Amino acid sequence: MLRLAGLAGVPVAVDVRRSGQILYRRSFPGTPPETDNCIERKAPAVAQFEVSSHLLALRLAHAEFDLGAPTWSAEARHAAVGGAFPIRVANVGLVAVATVSGLRSAEDHELAVAALQSVLEEMSLS
């Protein structure tokens, strides 16, 4: 994510965390201050539901469910917008959440997908 964000020169923040512990975070120049808040809401949603934040948003929209509704107890802690992905290890399960934030939801999602595809391709070559 860092390499792609740096090459594209986009104002995003990248965050990797495990069980709520931040393992890595970097903000590129021009990243809006509210990006940290968005990361703090995307990552827990992915950790809880174990799907990408974009997929969670699509599922919630299809079910006509609003995370901001008063009946949703975690609305202040969760955000269903693109850019966060669960990181799984075979025979282990969820080990981390990787998040990119700072662009529109779909652009965050596309950047994260491209970065993760690049990592998987590199892993398959070694």
Image (tube, rainbow, N blue to C red):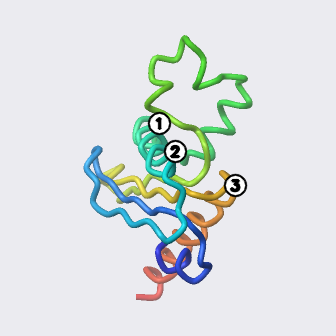
Could you tell me the amino acid type at mark 2? Val
**Rendered location of residue 50, percent (x, y):** 46, 42
Q: Nearer the viewer, mark 2 or mark 3?
A: 3
**Earlier residue among tags 2 and 3:** 2
SS state under label 2? loop
| Quadrant of the rendering where the C terminus is positioned | bottom left
What residue is drawn where x is 43% and y is 80%? 123
Could you tell me the amino acid type at mark 3? Ala
Q: Nearer the viewer, mark 1 or mark 3?
A: 3
Distance of label 1 from label 2 (alpha carbons): 6 Å
What residue is drawn where x is 46% and y is 39%? 41
User: Badges 2 and 3: C-beta atoms under 8 Å apart?
Assistant: no
Residue identifier under label 3: 106
Residue 51, numbered label: 2
Quarter location, residue 62: top right
Name the one closer to the observer, 75 or 95. 75
When the figure is inspected, residue 29 is found, relative to residue 76, above or below; the finding is: below
Q: Label 3 neighbourhood size at 10 Å, few (<14), some (14-19), many (20+)?
A: few
What residue is drawn where x is 52% and y is 17%? 72
**Rendered location of residue 107, percent (x, y):** 67, 60
User: Badges 1 and 2: C-beta atoms under 8 Å apart?
Assistant: yes
What residue is drawn where x is 45% and y is 23%? 74
Q: Label 1 neighbourhood size at 10 Å, few (<14), some (14-19), many (20+)?
A: few
Residue identifier under label 1: 49
